Amino acid sequence: MSKAGPYRLAVDIPESEVLHDSQGRVVDEAYVDGAVVEALARVRGRGRPSLSESGESPLLRVRLSRELDEAVRKAANDAGASRSEWVRKVLDQATHRTG
């Protein structure tokens, strides 16, 4: 069995041939450029929205005892918030206290 050599880019479609997509649109440089922009926008649009104006939301990981974790879950549930929302609110309140 022979090993395949490295892939080499080659022009396999003559310049005179016009390609069309499944909707009949002409596939040219502008079409490809637009498709790339659209694909990048979709990929970059994924994930959770940033919580910071700078666009970066640092992640804080902490270890909790089971008892404290259960208390946080219950407090968040009682407040009608997710655990993350509740913890952010409590940390915000704790760091903005005066006195």
Image (cartoon, grey):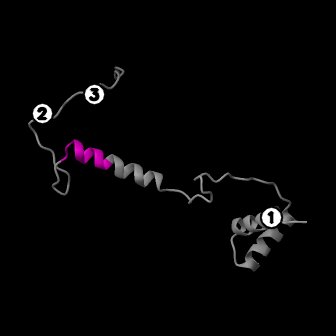
CA distance for labels 2 and 3 = 14 Å
Which label was assigned to residue 9?
A: 3
User: Which mark is first along the chain, 3 or 2?
Assistant: 3
Query: Relative to 74, does residue 56 appear above or below in the rendering?
Result: above
Horizontal and vertical percent position of residue 23: 19, 57
Callout 3: few (<14), some (14-19), or many (20+) C-alpha neighbours within 10 Å? few
| Amino acid bearing label 3 | Leu
| Magenta extent | 27-35
Residue 35, percent across and down?
30, 49
Q: Mark 1 or 3 closer to N-term?
A: 3
Query: Label 1 neighbourhood size at 10 Å, few (<14), some (14-19), many (20+)?
Result: few
Q: Which residue is mark 2?
A: 14
Is most of the magenta stretch helix, strand or loop?
Answer: helix
| Disc 1 from disc 3: Cα separation | 60 Å
Farthest residue, direction left: 16
Quarter-of-image position of residue 82: bottom right
Determine contact: label 1, label 3, CB under 8 Å.
Answer: no
The residue sitting at 27% across, 45% down in the picture is: 32
- Is 29 one of the magenta-colored residues? yes
Write the residue at 61% across / 51% down: 56
Name the element at disc 2.
Answer: loop
Mark sitting on residue 96: 1
The quadrant in which residue 30 appears is top left
Q: Amino acid under label 1?
A: His
Q: Amino acid at mark 2?
A: Pro
Task: Tell which tag, 1 or 3, sits nearer the viewer.
Answer: 1
- Cβ atoms at labels 2 and 1 below 8 Å apart: no
Tag 3 secondary structure: loop
